[in-house]
Image (cartoon, grey):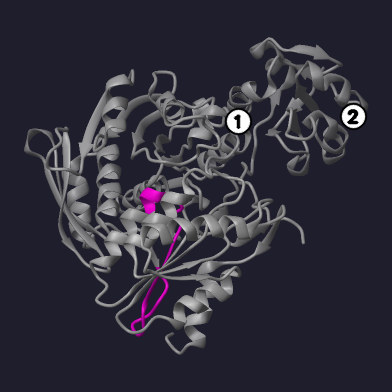
Amino acid sequence: MSELAPSALRPEHPVPRSLSGLVAEFDLELRGDIDGLEVTGVSLSSRTVQPGDLYVGVPGQHRHGAAFAEAAAEAGAVAILTDEAGVSLAAASGLPVLVTPDARAALGAVAAWVYRTADNPATLFAVTGTNGKTSVVYLLFGILNQLGVVSGLTSTAERRIGDLAVTSALTTPEASELHALLARMNEAEVRAVGIEVSAQALSRYRVDGLVFDVAAFTNLSHDHLDDYAAMDDYFQAKLELFQPDRSHRGVVTVDTDWGRRLADECRIPVTTITNRADVDADWRMTVVGESASHTEFILDGPDGRRLHTRVPLLGWYMAANAALAIVMLVESGFDLDAIAHTLRRDGGIVAFIPGRAERISGDRGPLVYIDYGHSPDAFLNTLAALRKFTPGKLIMLFGADGDRDTTKRADMGRIAAQGSDIVVVTDFHPRFEDAASIRAVLLAAARDAVPDGEFYEVANPRAAFRTALSLAHEGDTILYAGPGHEDYHEVQGVKLPYSAREDSRQALRDAGWL
């Protein structure tokens, strides 16, 4: 079965730019004739090339991208940008070749020039951190819509321009796709954009060519140590966003030592926010009411400013994400009183976050939540939030990513066992790893933490959810953590269609609960 692939959003009416201008702007070495040639787009993959594109060939895991130059030419590319190693590979395409020492490092600036990103009037918001990035971006999007601002977003879940949305492949798109998306947003008169910025995006040049108006930091916890040798390296990658060439202003959550360190070490003006009573910060979020359907909070700021509202999401951490989004808006120039007035008018924040503690169940039977969380800290917070509203048993269903950070798996198993009454372990994107071995690590950690716990091992995700559901009754809660919004299950390099959200709904219908 072929791999599922999203469609990138590009400008519908691109404005051509001359290749000679590109060569002059970036002092590129030229092999071939570009007289009179114009470029209208940039593509990093030969499969996404459109007529008029500049195809960028970079070294890949297995092959150099310049080896696909002929396919790019057949699709309508007008020139190739590559490094010295790619020149000979691109020669057979017959296209002019532009040469730079590192084509990937040049991609962001080149795409920004082609798509005229600097001319885009939209306010750009960046959100980084281990957990909460997607939620903050969607909360920004929701509040901006309530304020009447035409807005867009790019997140782990999707790229969105108003009501138009496509599925995401990466948390942060490659620079060529990101600048094309911003150009499309400019056509739609989008005036504010929320962008999830992963550590990998910063390390791999995906947000090059952009300077954000406001950048925010949520938190830092154990994750991605397959990409970074240690937590300090992971932190340094995040810190890169809070430099003058990346962002104008910062909003930093200082609940942890990592947040306080980032606030101290960043080199841009920064506003701090906390969700703790024992931490000093410019802004403070305090939860004043919680239910299974919403969280009510107060946000106190400098000069006695205060906002009291609610978010239609579960847990203190969602209130913290909402408060962070509000402070980001204030830092970008929005008036807090105007935001407060709008939220009072609407009865609180109006937002939906796909696959983030998303309730799947109806009015009858056990509560069922699908969540994208796949880190120890995410497990801890979500289970604690659900426990408050679960009079019966709390059932945890989860797995762990294959070919990803293996060092967090034991903590995931331990926290799942300690935070729930029943644990069901299943497969979650085993990729090229042995799925049984992944499950074994999770179960061993769970049993070590709670030796007399109730544990089940069901490899197939569909069967695993039905096992969890068979153990649940009215008053119980099931948390299915990991898949969230995703619509595939990756095994041996193949993305098999699978939506935990839709399959769970079907299982609930089959059981008579929906």
Quadrant that contains the N terminus: bottom right
Vertical side of 275 occupied by 80: above or below: above
Which is more toward the observer, 306 or 220?
220
Residue 115: mark: 1
Q: Which residue is mark 2?
A: 93
Residue 260: % across, % down? 26, 29
Residue lying at 27% horizontally and 21% vertically, measured from the top left: 264
Give the side of residue 420 with respect to residue 53, left or right: left
Residue lying at 52% horizontally and 42% vertically, measured from the top left: 185
Residue 196: % across, % down? 45, 41
Cα gap from disc 1 to disc 2, whole angstroms: 24 Å
Circle 2 crowding by C-alpha within 10 Å: few under 14, some 14–19, many from 20: many
The answer to whether residue 250 of the structure is visible from this angle is: yes
The answer to whether residue 356 of the structure is visible from this angle is: no
Q: Amino acid at mark 1?
A: Tyr
Circle 1 crowding by C-alpha within 10 Å: few under 14, some 14–19, many from 20: many
Magenta residue span:
359-378
Determine whether the residue tagged by mark 2 lies in a helix, strand or loop: helix
Which is more toward the observer, 47 or 450?
450
Q: Amino acid at mark 2?
A: Ser
Residue lying at 28% horizontally and 51% vertically, measured from the top left: 317
Give the side of residue 281 with respect to residue 134, left or right: left
Give the side of residue 54 with respect to residue 407, left or right: right
377 is within the stretch colored magenta: yes
Residue 162: % across, % down? 46, 53
Vertical side of 121 occupied by 344: above or below: below
Between disc 1 and disc 2, the foreground one is 2
Give the side of residue 506 with respect to residue 309, left or right: right
